[in-house]
């Protein structure tokens, strides 16, 4: 630890005597400075033990002591036996008033002895700090190469700094370690988006230091430590070492993941090119056997985080996955039911590997339908089952149906006839009057009158096949 005034006073070889501020002897002494100036504060940084023989006393002892206290000196060492036989009472009184320790230095004790004592103690403390930092860095490096390297580094960091330590991913999710202020810590993370690599701040009685992880501009995560006291310079070096080791691990992991994505993309191109045997051999060597025929292609689109989660989920199955444009492509077994949180998925019909290109086109069309209709999964066979309805944008379809059928809806709202129901029945029976009238329970002349009213309100020729098709589509969209 940094030497304190109490440690100096306790040394019998120095023979120091406390004359004021005895209750503040726990103050650390950063350095020793000697001055006979009436105002030496311009040459002080704070934390010094100032040594003097008191040549300045006649200029005002009280003001002198107040200036030293305001400058943040650790204490005043007053040499006696030269200018003064004892420490002046005015100095002692003012020092007691402001809480500044005053230590009498006897004539036989040279100031240099005190300077040497402090210098040796400071050097010993710095050496000890360097040794602790070196030992901590070795321990962190050893932890980093373990199978659970990330967790081991964070745990070792917490132990070496006698602090809590937590590792957060870019979204603020805890990856390793823990902190009593995790929730509040997450709210501080946006401060790093402007660029600072490290910040120190106080939160709930914790002195917290956060360092970003990652090479270049991209943030891979956040390493935070906190304790009641501020980190020393040596502690900061230990934290920097841990951050560097974690950054190297993250970058290496991302490099491996990027290489894996490129390999998977290349393998997908082989499959689409018909090189099934070669692709199967490579896949078996790297990831395992490809799914047995027949297979489906599933295309998943959505936020990158959800696509990565889907890829991770696929790792636990026999599915093969690869990036494809802005989507995740999966080759799955014919009986698979792929569905992923937060993604739209389009699934092809079951096919053999020789028809994988056709399966991809089907999956693309199904994905487009799923995206337009905001559905989690659409299978290609469902497009044929539902006709064109699933291919129509719901919002655009709603406007189309409302505009086309609006006059009929307004008419029916007055209670003057059931034109919508009559039109639906008539179109459902292919314009045949008797079956449609029977389905409605009305006379065919009544139905003829209603259909004529429909044509009049819409201003459309109901004998036109195009008109009938548009009206039938509008009615289906209103279902």
Image (cartoon, rainbow, N blue to C red):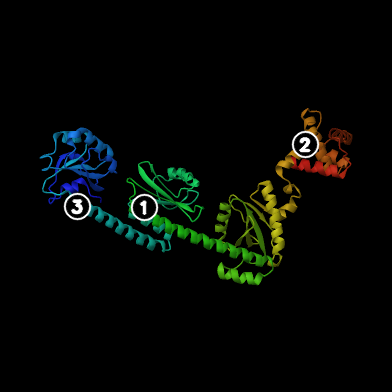
Q: Closer to us: mark 1 or mark 2?
A: 1
The quadrant of the image that shows the C terminus is top right
Which quadrant holds residue 37? top left
The residue beneath circle 3 is: 117
Please name the residue shown 43% across and 63% down the image.
147
Q: Which residue is mark 1?
A: 236
At label 3, counting other C-alpha atoms closer than 10 Å, the crowd grade (few under 14, some 14-19, many 20 or more) is some
Instruction: Tell me which numbered mark, 2 or 3, is placed earlier along the sequence.
Output: 3
Q: In the rendering, at what x and y percent does residue 52 appear?
A: 18, 43
Determine the secondary structure under disc 1.
helix
SS for callout 3: helix
Q: CA distance from mark 3 to mark 1?
A: 27 Å
Residue 118 in the image: state x and y as whole percent. 21, 51
**Residue 291 seen anywhere in this rendered image of the structure:** no
State the residue position of label 2.
Answer: 403
- Write the residue at 20% across / 46% down: 5
Closer to the observer: label 2 or label 3? 3
Mark 1–mark 2 distance (CA, rounded to whole Å): 69 Å
Q: Earlier in the sequence, mark 3 or mark 1?
A: 3
Residue 358 screen position, x and y as percent: 72, 61
Which comes sooner in the sequence, label 1 or label 2? 1
Viewer-proximal residue among 10 and 319: 10
Determine whether label 2 and label 3 are within 8 Å by CB: no
Distance from the alpha carbon under mark 2 to that under mark 3: 94 Å
The answer to whether any part of residue 406 appears in the image is yes
């Amino acid at each position: 630890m940094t030497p304190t005034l109490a440690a100096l006073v306790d040394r019998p070889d120095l023979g120091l005597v406390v004359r004021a501020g005895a209750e503040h002897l726990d103050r650390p002494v950063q350095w020793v400075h000697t001055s006979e100036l009436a105002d030496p504060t311009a040459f002080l940084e704070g934390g010094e033990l100032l040594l003097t023989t008191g040549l300045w006393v006649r200029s005002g002892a009280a003001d002198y002591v107040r200036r030293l206290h305001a400058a943040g000196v650790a204490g005043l060492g007053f040499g006696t036996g030269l200018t003064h036989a004892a420490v002046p009472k005015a100095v002692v009184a003012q020092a007691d008033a402001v809480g500044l320790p005053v230590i009498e230095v006897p004539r036989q004790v040279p100031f240099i002895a005190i300077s040497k004592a402090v210098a040796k103690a400071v050097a010993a403390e710095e050496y000890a700090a360097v040794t602790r930092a070196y030992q901590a860095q070795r321990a962190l490096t050893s932890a980093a190469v373990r199978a659970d390297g990330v967790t081991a580094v964070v745990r070792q960091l917490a132990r070496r700094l006698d602090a809590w330590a937590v590792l957060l991913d870019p979204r603020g999710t805890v990856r390793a370690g823990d902190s009593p202020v995790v929730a509040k810590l997450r709210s501080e993370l946006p401060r790093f988006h402007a660029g600072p690599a490290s910040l120190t701040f106080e939160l709930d009685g914790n002195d917290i230091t956060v360092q970003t992880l990652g090479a270049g501009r991209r943030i891979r995560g956040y390493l935070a430590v906190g304790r009641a006291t501020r980190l020393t310079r040596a502690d900061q070096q230990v934290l920097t070492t841990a951050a560097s080791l974690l950054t190297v691990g993250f970058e290496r992991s991302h490099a491996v993941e990027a290489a894996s994505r490129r390999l998977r993309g290349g393998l997908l191109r082989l499959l689409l090119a018909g090189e099934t045997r070669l692709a199967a051999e490579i896949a078996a060597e790297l990831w395992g056997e490809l799914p047995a025929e027949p297979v489906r292609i599933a295309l998943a689109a959505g936020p990158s985080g959800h696509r990565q989660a889907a890829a991770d989920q696929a790792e636990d199955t026999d599915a093969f996955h690869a990036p494809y444009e802005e989507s995740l492509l999966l080759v799955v077994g014919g009986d698979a039911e792929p569905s992923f949180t937060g993604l739209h998925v389009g699934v092809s019909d079951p096919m053999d590997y020789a028809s994988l290109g056709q399966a991809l086109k089907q999956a693309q069309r199904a994905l487009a339908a799923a995206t337009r209709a905001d559905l989690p999964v659409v299978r290609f066979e469902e497009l044929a089952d539902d006709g064109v309805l699933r291919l129509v944008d719901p919002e655009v379809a709603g406007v189309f149906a409302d505009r086309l059928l609006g006059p009929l809806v307004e008419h029916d709202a007055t209670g003057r006839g059931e034109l919508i129901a009559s039109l639906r029945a008539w179109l459902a029976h292919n314009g045949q009057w008797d079956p449609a009238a029977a389905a409605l329970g009305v006379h065919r002349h009544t139905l003829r009158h209603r259909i004529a009213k429909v044509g009049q309100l819409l201003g459309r020729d109901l004998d036109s096949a195009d008109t009938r098709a548009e009206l039938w589509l509008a009615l289906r969209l209103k279902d």
